[in-house]
Amino acid sequence: MIKKSIIVFTAVFALYNLLLHWLSPETFIPQNIKQDNVIKVQEYIYSDLPKEKVILGSSLAAKLDKDMLAKSGFFNLAFRGQSVYDGLKIISKSNVTPKIIFIEINVLTRHPSITLEDLWFEPAVVQIKKALPALKERNQPVNNLLLAIQICLKSLREENNNVTIAEDEKTINKPKESQSQIVFENSYINKRIAEYQNLPNDSSMKILIASLKQDILNLESKGVKIVFFEMPMHPKICESPRLNAIREIIRLNFPREKYAHYPPVDCQAYKTRDGIHLASESVPIYTKFFINQSEEYQ
Amino acid sequence: MLFNSYIYVCLVCLTFAFYYMPIFKKFQIHILIIASFIFYAYSQLTLLLLLTFSAFVNIITSYYISYGNRAYRKFYATLGVIINLGVLAFFKYSPLIAQTLFRQTDSIAEFLLSIPLPVGISFYTFQGISLMIDVYRSDKIAAYRDLVAPDLWVHAKKTMFFIVFFPQLVAGPVVKAHDFIPQISAKCFKDINWEAAFKSLIIGYFLKMVIADNIKEQTLYMSFPYFESQHSAVLIMMLFGYSMQIFSDFAGYSLIAIGTAHLFGYKLMTNFNFPYIASSFSEFWRRWHISLSSFLKEYLYIPLGGNRRGEARTYINLLITMFLGGLWHGAAWSYAVWGTFHGGALAVERFLKTYIKLPDNKFTIFFQSLFVFFSVTLFWLLFRLPEFSHAVKYVLSIAKNTSYQIRDEHKAIIGTVLLYSVPVWLYHWYYLHRDRLQFLQKYEYIAYGVLLFFILTNSGTPGEFIYFQF
């Protein structure tokens, strides 16, 4: 019984790998935030995607439009729930060095939290994951099932309506929020605004900035260009003491004379969902601006 | 050390290799004890001392119960039980005592809050209690007389092994002395029950790595205050998902422990027997965490009088047993409330059964099972949200968030929870219809092959077993 089970497993595993090689799905649907982050790490280490222009940051920068960035040759290594420092760790451990790195400054107060296994970066493991795509997180059977369901539903909807549903129409026609939900979300935004009135912890920031400086020095020694940018947030958070303090720390440690910086962000021009993350209608607008502005530094 | 980590697999493989080498045949128990120490010390090196201390207390007191002055047998047994309970109370319930009896700024409260919680303490202290009581009862139960070897060194070895055996050390099954110690003997490679080990390990790892570890990323949003912004349907689905998660996590762990024990020639008791098909609360407790419920029944409920002292006393005994059983799960009053809910449900069920006879047909059983499942699922909220006020807010949010927007990410939560619940329901459904589906047994290797495929390709990000916190 055990032998037969192992034979069945081997057959199913081989078939699935062959299917993945044949189909080579470009898109994927992560099941959750953690998996999305792991997929990003694996894509960075194991895929042949272009990695000359890399974005590092938190869930704020992770919101940038994936397709628009991919068309322009960006690799978004911003992790939801994590920070710039996690992305820097990945880059330093891997053999892939970008030409230019865009660093989000909004959440520089968050310490790194990713646990990296040295095994992930071993050349043999890299080759195995490339040869056996079934072992990559993005190719989990459930991810591909969700992708297949999404494609089927989309084509069924388009068949029924006889039109292709444009992305902006989807945004305009989405169900409206109820009054009680609006009240709740406003109170949530107010809590966030209140949080941002607190200055960052001095000693903690010293440690983080020292580590950032060291990482940047190492990258610059390999010929990498560094550009700092800021994601739009709620106007009141944009003008908050915490964000002003972070800007000042960046100005002192990474002056504009020596480092490239995006121009100050106009927070009034964008909408956020919860005070800090861009709303879906503002994502393509800011992503377009981000890509256009990046041309100046390349 | 997690069961689904490379280091654990290496430990098991190395231990297995040495264990069955002919030159080490006389040292099999020593090898398992050393492996168990490594297993425990990996996560809590300093608290290995406590584990060893606990084992020594059990060795000495149980030896004295058997071979000491007979006039003091009860005294030694009582002392052994009190020390075990004392260790458990001190290390596990200090924070609860601090929060209940003292202000947080009091120095005694600060001290009590700083006491670390040793992993597995609820399990190995209970095993020590089982040993004390079984040895004490050996004058009335002949089968228990061999639990304590006359040679102190042999007894010390066997008891140490019984307490620290790594598959069940940190999250059970709770092993009783009279079930385990008689099994201790030299084991041969040819006697390994490979099929039983393979099946337990595959189903165990599937439930833990594929089901529990994936669902947990969706039930993350059950935390306060995130749940306050979710639609009622999402809240209900997450609660349902948590019910699947806790079963898969715990049953998975138990099966991995059972499968690993098989590799070394030891049989641990079945800990979960398809609990979500139960059509009554008493049946649920005969199917869920069987090792704990049978322990509580044998060492607490029956000594309290069980159902032998009249109806009113039976209900009180049920409430006490389940209250303490709930509190065993964690140092928070919400666990005691959870236990009391179950005790109350058992008592009410018992009372109603005396006066109401429901028709015994498929529909009645089906609706009863649904009722038990929904009640148990609702009670699990106290596990997920030990802060009682948060649990109340969650229920209130279900009632009032009916007009909230369901965003795409919420639909993803609902879809993913439903998808990962399917195998759990299939598992229960197959068990219910196993007589009619016997013809499928010859194809079960296909199922195990596919499960192994999903373990390798569809595991969630590793997380600790939920019951590690107990």
Image (cartoon, coloured by chain):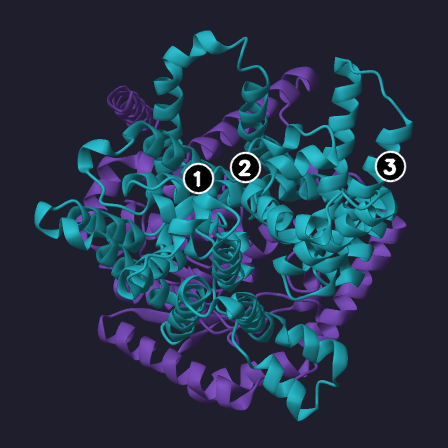
Residue B261 located left or right of residue B214: left
**Distance between the alpha carbons at the discs numbered 1 and 2:** 9 Å
Taking depth in this image into account, of B396 and B120 the one nearest to the observer is: B120
Q: Chain of mark 1?
A: B
Q: Chain of mark 2?
A: B
Using the image, determine if residue B313 lies above or below residue B278. Answer: below
- Chain in cyan, by letter, is B
Residue A44 located left or right of residue B394: left
* Mark closest to the chain's N terminus, 1 or 2: 1
Taking depth in this image into account, of B355 and A178 the one nearest to the observer is: B355
Taking depth in this image into account, of B300 and B433 the one nearest to the observer is: B300
| Contact between labelled residues 2 and 1, with CB atoms less than 8 Å apart | yes
Using the image, determine if residue A194 lies above or below residue B270. Answer: below
Type of the residue with mark 2: Phe
Residue A197 position within the rendered picture, expressed as x and y whole percent measured from the top left: 70, 81
Q: Are marks 2 and 3 on the same chain?
A: yes
Report the residue at 23% width, 58% height from top. Answer: B30
Type of the residue with mark 1: Leu
Write down the residue under mark 3: B351
Q: Secondary structure at mark 3?
A: helix
Residue B349 position within the rendered picture, expressed as x and y whole percent measured from the top left: 82, 36
Taking depth in this image into account, of B256 and A120 the one nearest to the observer is: B256
Report the residue at 38% width, 76% height from top. Answer: B46
Write down the residue under mark 2: B272
Q: Are marks 1 and 3 on the same chain?
A: yes
**Distance between the alpha carbons at the discs numbered 1 and 3:** 35 Å
| Contact between labelled residues 3 and 1, with CB atoms less than 8 Å apart | no
Q: Colour of chain A?
A: purple
Write down the residue under mark 1: B255
Image quarter where the N terminus of chain A lies is top left
